[in-house]
Amino acid sequence: MNKITNILLLLIVSTGISCQNNENYNNMEYNELTPEEKRVIIDKGTEMPFIGIYDDHYEEGVYKCKQCNTPLFLSDNKFDAGCGWPAFDDAIDGAVKEIPDKDGYRTEIVCANCGGHLGHVFKGEGFTPANIRHCVNSISLNFEPLKIEPMDTSQYEIAIFAAGCFWGVEHHLKLAKGVISTEVGYTGGHKINPTYKDVCYTNTGHAEAVKVVFDPNITSFSELAKLFFEIHDPGQLDRQGPDIGNQYRSEVFFTNDSQKETAHELIETLKLKGYKVVTRVTPAGIFYPAEEYHQDYYDKTGSNPYCHIYKKKF
């Protein structure tokens, strides 16, 4: 169970929200529904695919029943199934009830508290290790974002790396010992507030990069930089595997002189070992966070990096 899941569950418990035997919910007044919401939630209809507000939505928080506000799903369990409806590979314990569908071959899911129609559940598809997909209508849900106090980073250090597609780079770096948080984004260029489309299709000068907040009492910039060099090929110029373009370059954006010196030392060590290295070492500038759907991409999709494979080099 990860850190965000623990926080979300604590939020649910601390606010008195329980999905099992909760008399407050069983006796509460239901929210007023629009005609379209009634068509889906009461009359068991289905909204059109790819139009729901929560289909391509990955903010941290809790998804609740539109009719009675019962917490149903955690954002940690949401993934992209490509089906056009929100998909979850788990539900909050006791929150969702499964009922054989009238069509004779599907299984309907409803809110265990109010009976409101949510969608259907499918098993054995292999989308995630849980091997289950709760396919839910967005219109059956409300979303409550997770509110976290801003992190005090005064005791931590920041490192910024670019090594091709930022999905895979973040996937490896976030698992490293001593890493507090990671964020993918764009840096090193000239365009203010670039979008993913800008970086991919126009000359912004930005690289896809990962900002790492780490605890120097647990790990060091040197250890993270070694990992950076070991999860990509620093000898490829303006590309990484199948991803070609200046935005996929290899670059260390140092935040202090010590990081600069360490990066250069590691590059020289690699060259002495016979590796080709074209990695740039430049001062860190403004870091623009990427769109939410890029953050923690492989966690959301349940897949693995295709062009970042670890290879020990030090």
Image (cartoon, rainbow, N blue to C red):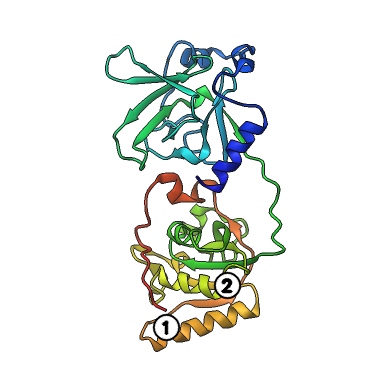
Q: Residues within 10 Å of mark 2 (few under 14, many from 20)?
A: some
When asked about the image quadrant of residue 249, the answer is bottom left
User: What residue lies at 44% left-to-right and 22% top-to-bottom?
Assistant: 47
Most extreme residue toward the front is: 21
Q: CA distance from mark 1 to mark 2?
A: 19 Å
Which mark is on residue 220?
Answer: 2
The dot on residue 270 is: 1
Q: Residue furthest left?
A: 105
| Horizontal arrangement in the rendering, residue 283 relative to residue 48 (left or right) | right
Q: Nearer the viewer, residue 291 or 90?
A: 90
Q: Total number of numbered labels?
A: 2
What residue lies at 49% left-to-right and 14% top-to-bottom? 115
Tell me the quarter of the picture where residue 131 sits.
Answer: top left
Residue 173 appears at what percent x and percent y?
49, 62
User: Taking the image as drawn, is residue 188 in sight?
Assistant: no
Q: Position of residue 37 (x, y in %)?
A: 52, 16
Q: Amino acid at mark 2?
A: Ser
Measured along the vertical axis of the image, is residue 113 above or below residue 247?
A: above
Q: Which three-letter amino acid code belongs to the residue tagged 1?
A: Leu
Q: Residues within 10 Å of mark 1 (few under 14, many from 20)?
A: some
